[in-house]
Image (cartoon, rainbow, N blue to C red):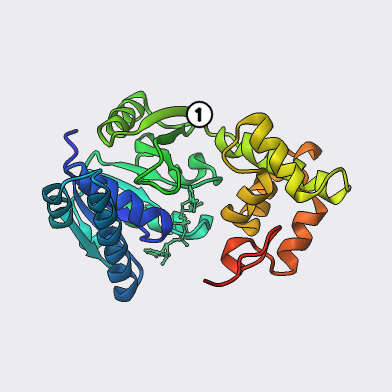
C-alpha cells in the first residue's frame, strides 16, 4: 500500500516527536489529542522543535514550512479518517491503548497498518482487538524522536511479513535505522536496559558504592553517555518500576524483581527529573 496519510494518536513527549518526523518526511500527518488545548500544545511543540532544527541548520526554512503545512490536528481518529498508517503513542495503559486501536481500526483506510509505540505492553494482545491483527506491529521510537536514530520494530505473534516489510521500509524513509525484536516482555531495549538500571540501584542499596561512583564507573568504564542512576532519573523512576514489573510478571522469573529501593523511591514521590528529585536533585530552573 502506498502510504501518504498518517495518523499519530497522543501528542505528548513521544507523539509530537513522531508527528514531527512524519510531517518532515513528506507525509500528510494528523496528530490526535484528547482535548483541543492539548492538540494545540502538541502542534506548538512540533513548531518549536522545527524552529530549533532550522536554527541549527539541520533543516532548511522551506523544509520547516512544508512540514508545518502537512501537519493537522484532530480530536479523534474518526476525524482523521482514511489514513493508511497510524502510530498510537498515548499513555502506557493497556485498556486505553485497546480503545484507541478499536477507534483506529474503524477509521483507517482498508489495508492500513496500525502501529503502537508502547515501551512494554504486549503488541500481540493489542492486535487481538482489531479485525485484521496481521496489520498490527510495534514501532518503538526513542526519545527525543527527531534526534534518535533507532526504531525498535516489534513483531506480534500475528504480524504478517508484508506488514513487517512495509514498516521496515517506512522506518528507513524517516531516516531512522530499524532493528527487530519479537514480542516478548521488554522487547530488547528495555529487557537489557532496565535490569542494568535495577542492578545499579541494588548496588546503591547494598552500599557497594556511592551513586556518583556507580555512574562514573559505567560512564568512563563502559563508555555509556550517562550513568544508570542518572539515566533512571531522566526516564522517570515510576516508568522504570513499571517496566521492571512487566518483566517480572511476564517471565515469572525472580531475576527481574524490582529493587526495594526503587519501589521506595517511587512510594516517596522521588520520581527523578520530573519531580525535582530522584537519585540526584533537580532544582527548578
Ligand atoms: P505522555 O504522557 O507525554 O503523552 C501521552 C499523551 O497521550 C498525552 O498528551 C495524553 O493527553 C494523550 N492521550 C491520552 N488519552 C488520549 C486519547 N484518548 N486520545 C488522544 N490522546 C490521548 O507519554 P509519552 O512519554 O509520550 O509516552 C507515550 C507512549 O510512548 C507510551 O506508550 C510510552 O510507553 C511510550 N514511550 C515513551 C518513551 C519516553 O521516553 N517517554 C520512549 C519510548 C516509548
Q: Quadrant of residue 223?
A: top right
Position of 195 with respect to 105 (left or right) is right
The residue shown at (36%, 69%) is: 34
Relative to 32, residue 198 above or below: above
Front position in the image: 154 or 98: 154
The reply, left or right, for residue 38 in relation to residue 193 is: left
Question: In the rendered image of this protein, does residue 62 appear above or below residue 172?
Answer: below
| Left or right, residue 30 beside residue 195 | left
Q: Look at the numbered disc 1 and give the secondary structure of its residue.
A: strand
Q: Is residue 270 left or right of residue 202?
A: left
Q: Residue at x 60, y 57 (%)?
A: 236
Tell me if I can see residue 51 in this picture: yes
Q: Where does residue 96 sit, x and y in percent of width and height? A: 47, 60
Quadrant hosting ligand 1: bottom left
In the rendered image, residue 24, in percent from the top left (x then y), is placed at 21, 46
Query: Which residue sits at x=71%, y=63%?
Result: 266
Give residue 252's position: percent from left, percent from top.
75, 39
Q: Which quadrant does the N terminus fall into?
A: top left
**Label 1: few (<14), some (14–19) or many (≥20) C-alpha neighbours in 10 Å:** some
- In the picture of the structure, the residue carrying the numbered disc 1 is 181
Q: Residue at x 30, y 61 (%)?
A: 32
Residue 117 pos. (x, y %): 43, 46
Residue 46 sits above or below residue 38 on the image: above
Number of numbered callouts drawn: 1
Of residues 279 and 265, the one drawn nearer to the viewer in this rendering: 279
Question: Which quadrant holds residue 169?
Answer: top left
Q: Is residue 187 visible?
A: no
Amino acid at each position: 500500500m502506498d502510504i501518504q496519510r498518517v495518523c499519530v494518536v497522543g501528542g505528548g513527549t513521544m507523539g509530537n516527536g513522531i508527528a514531527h518526523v512524519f510531517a518532515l518526511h513528506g507525509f500528510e500527518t494528523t496528530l490526535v489529542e484528547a482535548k483541543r488545548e492539548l492538540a494545540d500544545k502538541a502542534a506548538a511543540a512540533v513548531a518549536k522543535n522545527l524552529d530549533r532544527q532550522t536554527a541549527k541548520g539541520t533543516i532548511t526554512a522551506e523544509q520547516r514550512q512544508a512540514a508545518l503545512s502537512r501537519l493537522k490536528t484532530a480530536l479523534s481518529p474518526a476525524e482523521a479518517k482514511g489514513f493508511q498508517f497510524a502510530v498510537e503513542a498515548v499513555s502506557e495503559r493497556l485498556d486505553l491503548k485497546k480503545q484507541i486501536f478499536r477507534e483506529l481500526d474503524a477509521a483507517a483506510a482498508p489495508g492500513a497498518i496500525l502501529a503502537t509505540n508502547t515501551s512494554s505492553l504486549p503488541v500481540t494482545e493489542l492486535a487481538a482487538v482489531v479485525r485484521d491483527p496481521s496489520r498490527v506491529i510495534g514501532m518503538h521510537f526513542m526519545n527525543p524522536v527527531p534526534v534518535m536514530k533507532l526504531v525498535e520494530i516489534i513483531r506480534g505473534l500475528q504480524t504478517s511479513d508484508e506488514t513487517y516489510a512495509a514498516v521496515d521500509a517506512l522506518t528507513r524513509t524517516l531516516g531512522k535505522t530499524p532493528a527487530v525484536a519479537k514480542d516478548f516482555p521488554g522487547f530488547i531495549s528495555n529487557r537489557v536496559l532496565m535490569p542494568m538500571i535495577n542492578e545499579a540501584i541494588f548496588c546503591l542499596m547494598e552500599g557497594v558504592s556511592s551513586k556518583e561512583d556507580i555512574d562514573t564507573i559505567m560512564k568512563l568504564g563502559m563508555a555509556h553517555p550517562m550513568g544508570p542512576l542518572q539515566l533512571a532519573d531522566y526516564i522517570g523512576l515510576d516508568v522504570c518500576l513499571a517496566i521492571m514489573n512487566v518483566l517480572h510478571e511476564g517471565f515469572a522469573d525472580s531475576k527481574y524483581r524490582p529493587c526495594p529501593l526503587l519501589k521506595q523511591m517511587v512510594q516517596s514521590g522521588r520520581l527523578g527529573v520530573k519531580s525535582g528529585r530522584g537519585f540526584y536533585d533537580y532544582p527548578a530552573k
